[in-house]
Image: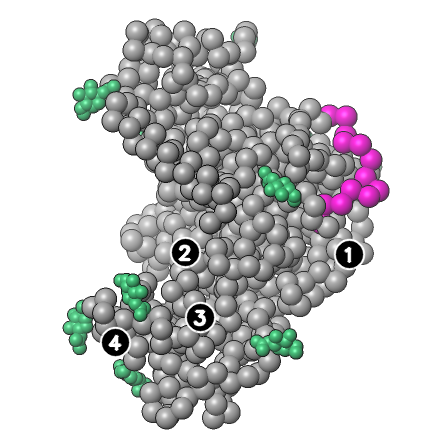
Amino acid sequence: MSSLSRLLFLAFFLSLLFFASNSEHDNRTTYIVYMGSHPKDRVSTRSHHERMLEEAIGSSFTRGSLLHSYKKSFNGFVVKLTEDEVQKVSEMKGVISVFPNGKKQLHTTRSWDFMGLSQQVSRVPLVESDIIVGVLDTGIWPESPSFLDEGYGPPPPKWKGSCETSLNFSCNNKIIGARSYRTSGNYAIGDIQGPIDSNGHGTHTASTVAGGLVRQASMLGLGTGTARGGVPSARIASYKICWSDGCSDADILAAFDDAIADGVDIISFSVGGHTPNNYFNDSIAIGAFHAMKNGILTSMSAGNDGWKPFTIRNFSPWSLSVAASTTDRRFLSKVQLGDGRSFDGVTINTFDLNGTQYPLVYAGNIPNVSAGFNGSISRFCLRNSVDSDLVKGKIVLCDHFVSPKKTIFLEGAIGIIMQDNRPKDLTFPFPLPASHLGTQQGALISSYANLTSLPTATILKSTEGKYKATPFVASFSSRGPNPITPDILKPDLSGPGVEILAAWTPLGPPSGAEEDTRQLLFNIISGTSMSCPHATAVAAYVKSFHPSWSPAALKSALMTTAFPMRADLNPDAEFAYGSGHINPLGAVNPGLIYNATEIDYVRFLCGQGYSTKLVQQVSGDNSSCSRGDFDLVFDLNYPSFALSTPMSTSISQVYRRRVTNVGSANSTYKAIVSGPSGLKITLNPSVLSFKALGEELSFELTIEGSISRGIASASLVWDDGQHNVKSPIVVFDPNTFN
Ligand SMILES: *[C@@H]1O[C@H](CO)[C@@H](O)[C@H](O)[C@H]1NC(C)=O
Ligand SMILES: *[C@@H]1O[C@H](CO)[C@@H](O)[C@H](O)[C@H]1NC(C)=O
Ligand SMILES: *[C@@H]1O[C@H](CO)[C@@H](O)[C@H](O)[C@H]1NC(C)=O
Ligand SMILES: *[C@@H]1O[C@H](CO)[C@@H](O)[C@H](O)[C@H]1NC(C)=O
Ligand SMILES: *[C@@H]1O[C@H](CO)[C@@H](O)[C@H](O)[C@H]1NC(C)=O
Ligand SMILES: *[C@@H]1O[C@H](CO)[C@@H](O)[C@H](O)[C@H]1NC(C)=O
Ligand SMILES: *[C@@H]1O[C@H](CO)[C@@H](O)[C@H](O)[C@H]1NC(C)=O
Ligand SMILES: *[C@@H]1O[C@H](CO)[C@@H](O)[C@H](O)[C@H]1NC(C)=O
Ligand SMILES: *[C@@H]1O[C@H](CO)[C@@H](O)[C@H](O)[C@H]1NC(C)=O
Ligand SMILES: *[C@@H]1O[C@H](CO)[C@@H](O)[C@H](O)[C@H]1NC(C)=O
């Protein structure tokens, strides 16, 4: 052990001691106190928050317990409180919610061509290069070839942000801003302070949105092509909110507070946690609300907790919730047995064994007996269950998927073959040659391993294959219905999130496993974390043509032009893919827009039973929920329609909507409705005649009838011969999902 690492080790134990002894005396936990918008007449300050706390909890308040004040874009603070104090603070005037500072988790370049956004598409480069994308993630690797700033002018004048420069980190004209957040002040071992990305995730998402062109990019030969973001001229502002131990609510809100004030145009947010019980008890929904209030759309990952229903994590009506689907490319890693048979498995395998056959051993036959395991356990390759001496120099067959971060016990093994019935659309890079197969193939391999005297196998480097029917929503992508407001359809749409090649940091192992020594500039990973930045980029692309469009207008453009997805490939239909698959070129020219402003969301919140007091504080104005100043959920001007209702009960539900003409001045749109028998969907009026651009017309949609199955999918299309403005209509029985 070098003296430096011994020192670090010592520091680590000292810090453990420090925290342990500290917590004996202080049972305060960290809470977020959210207070909505700033009062009209003044901006809140730290001293204001201190006075509030003194008043609420009296002499037991110490200044050091106030960890952070939000004071730029909204009002609130982070403070350490006991349970009694939480009660007192919650009752104070101006406090909307008090919630514990929880932890959230992190949830190319085939993908752009797959969606029709080729390198040759028309662009508005001067406007595009003025677009600033705020990426809230694990930071950024500034030396990536994706972030070279050759040919970029200085940051646009509206930019008010800053760059946390250090010895090893500086911004340029591509990455124009970078900040990092660690409200707790305690850094976990191995984390690098400052905005530098030592994980890779933030570099990957940022480059998917706005990375410049990098020719001959690949992950050690896989996915070779030109890597590029969807808006390669746009600027990046990086906000590091996630560390090796997760992403805290306090840091998430601090980043939103800054990003809004810094002047970003759009926010990309590939992070999520548990399902909140209330929109204003959730740092992400709160941050996105204030972004929307300031004209900034937040594009969010739906979550990676599929395929079960109600697993969507980010679903506030003022943000865009993005599911993850396949492209036409997939990666296969073949297993070849000594007897010549071969099987297609999946994983992202960059290792080349040169076709050499190695001894094959079945994990069920090599239990770690001294630790008390037998074959019925070791076959699953659980931690320590296999005899690590007997895997050396061999390829191991396991009857279960093993996470890439947990293969360390196989150190010395040549490779791992895993077989189970898990979906094969979630693939990972592993720190050693690996292949993941289905149970039928697995049974053939295990019987070969059992019954042959000297069984051998090899695992080939991954090759590119094609999906027969694509796109489909990945099994891991979180599904609707919306857990808080079931009558608003979520997710909103789907985008590429499976096996996406994008930039990486050489500081972070591509498989996430510590023993992985590959230092790469590109990596291939999957998740709604990867589909979210695709949607962010498309929204930014649309904004480059229509700089004045509101967040709701951008969202509407993306949703109403989405490519239809096939319900036969996606049994959860709209709860998997929302309006369908993102269509970058179509979204630029949607014809009509379902616009909404803060007032619409405020009226919606009133209709949801949030009090006038809460709504006034959130919005910072004197909006009132009384006197009919509220909307039922059905009247929020949303570009999709959902209705939660028991099966076989007769329905009659009216939705009021408004559409703004952004197509041709003189245009007449006719309503085309399709849906299952049993549902009668009528439009009033069913023809909309526009005389001018920007003109807004209202209509009512009525659903009558009843449903006889869990989900009934229908649709409305406004058609003027040029544009198809399409909205899904979903009537469902939530009980059939439980
Ligand atoms: C911590 O909790 C214990 C009992 O659970 C209590 O007696 C003590 O007063 C608490 N300390 C503080 C600082 O609240
Ligand atoms: C900064 O970079 C140098 C050279 O690459 C490296 O030795 C050093 O550890 C880095 N420091 C930090 C804090 O990352
Ligand atoms: C917010 O969440 C906390 C913890 O789950 C809960 O105690 C509190 O009642 C919630 N507040 C609101 C306003 O929903
Ligand atoms: C495969 O062949 C290459 C080139 O000859 C060599 O560098 C590499 O070490 C070989 N790999 C293995 C696992 O034998
Ligand atoms: C194997 O171990 C498990 C768990 O320890 C035990 O339940 C089982 O009976 C064992 N099987 C045999 C064949 O010993
Ligand atoms: C068996 O498991 C124990 C831990 O329970 C571990 O220390 C030991 O190294 C393992 N033995 C072998 C041969 O893998
Ligand atoms: C291989 O052997 C194990 C016992 O060692 C047994 O459980 C398993 O069913 C066998 N598999 C096949 C396909 O024969
Ligand atoms: C939508 O509403 C906002 C706020 O009133 C307005 O600025 C914008 O021009 C409207 N239309 C579009 C297409 O964004
Ligand atoms: C409150 O709202 C009314 C209109 O409803 C407006 O005239 C008045 O200026 C508002 N007052 C404040 C303080 O915003
Ligand atoms: C729209 O139509 C009206 C009458 O049909 C015509 O007078 C007007 O010039 C047209 N406007 C445009 C922009 O084409």
Q: Earlier in the sequence, mark 1 or mark 4?
A: 1
Q: Which residue is mark 1?
A: 119
Rendering quarter of residue 509: bottom right
Residue 170 as seen in the image, left or right of residue 422 = right
Q: Amino acid at mark 2?
A: Gly
Q: SS for tag 3?
A: loop
Q: Which residue is rendered at x = 38% and y = 65% of the image?
A: 409
Asked if the magenta segment contains residue 459, the reply would be no
**Which residue is label 3 attached to?**
412
Q: Residues within 10 Å of mark 4 (few under 14, many from 20)?
A: some
Q: Identify the residue shown where x is 55% and y is 35%.
A: 193
Front position in the image: 210 or 29: 29
If you read the primary sequence from the N terminus, does the residue marked by circle 2 or circle 1 appear first? Answer: 1
Q: Dot 1, crowdedness within 10 Å: few (<14), some or many (≥20)?
A: some
Q: Which residues are magenta?
A: 146-158
Q: CA distance from mark 1 to mark 4?
A: 54 Å
Q: Amino acid at mark 3?
A: Gly
Camera-side mark, 2 or 4: 4
Q: CA distance from mark 2 to mark 3?
A: 34 Å
- Ligand 7 within 8 Å of disc 4? The answer is yes
Where residue 34 sits in the image (x, y, percent)? 42, 22
**Residue that mark 2 sits on:** 306
Say which label, 1 or 3, has the lower sequence index: 1
In terms of depth relative to the viewer, which is nearer, 482 or 372? 372
Q: Secondary structure at mark 2?
A: loop
Per the image, the residue denoted by label 4 is: 375
